[in-house]
């Protein structure tokens, strides 16, 4: 699971280091993405997903 830092949208160090993220990947600040509500609906291939920030500052993506 990839955890994102709530202020920079960069990966947080965890037990598994993600190997699929490169410096050339597009980046967006989580505050910009989630807005003041701390949540955003993402539409992907006709499906809706909810990305939200928990009270602990972690991100959760649910279908």
Image (cartoon, rainbow, N blue to C red):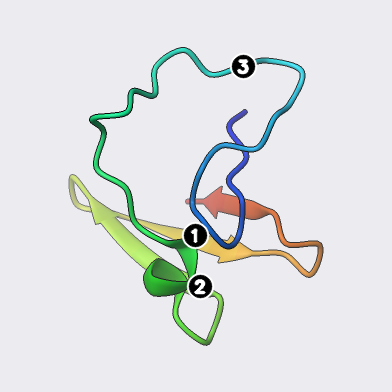
Considering only order in the chain, which callout, 2 or 1, is on the residue closer to the N terminus? 2
- Report, in whole angstroms, how far the alpha carbon at label 1 lies from the one at label 2: 6 Å
Taking 16 as reference, is 15 left or right? right
Residue behind mark 2? 39
Q: Secondary structure at mark 3?
A: loop
Packing grade of label 3 (10 A; few <14, some 14-19, many >=20) is few
Which residue is located at x 18 percent, y 45 percent?
45
- How many marks overall? 3
> What x and y, as percent, mark residue 22?
33, 23
Residue behind mark 1? 51
Q: Are marks 3 and 1 in contact (CB under 8 Å)?
A: no
Residue behind mark 3? 17
- Report, in whole angstroms, how far the alpha carbon at label 3 lies from the one at label 1: 21 Å
Q: Secondary structure at mark 2?
A: strand
Query: 39 and 32: which one is in front?
Result: 32
Tell me the quarter of the image containing the N terminus.
Answer: top right
Which residue is located at x 62 percent, y 40 percent?
3
Taking 54 as reference, is 11 left or right? left
């Amino acid at each position: 699971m990839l955890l994102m830092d709530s202020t920079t949208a960069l990966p947080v160090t965890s037990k598994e280091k993600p190997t699929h993220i490169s410096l050339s990947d597009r980046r967006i600040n989580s505050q910009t993405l989630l807005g003041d509500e701390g949540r955003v609906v993402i539409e992907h291939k006709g499906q809706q997903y909810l990305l939200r920030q928990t009270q602990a500052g972690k991100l959760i993506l649910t279908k």
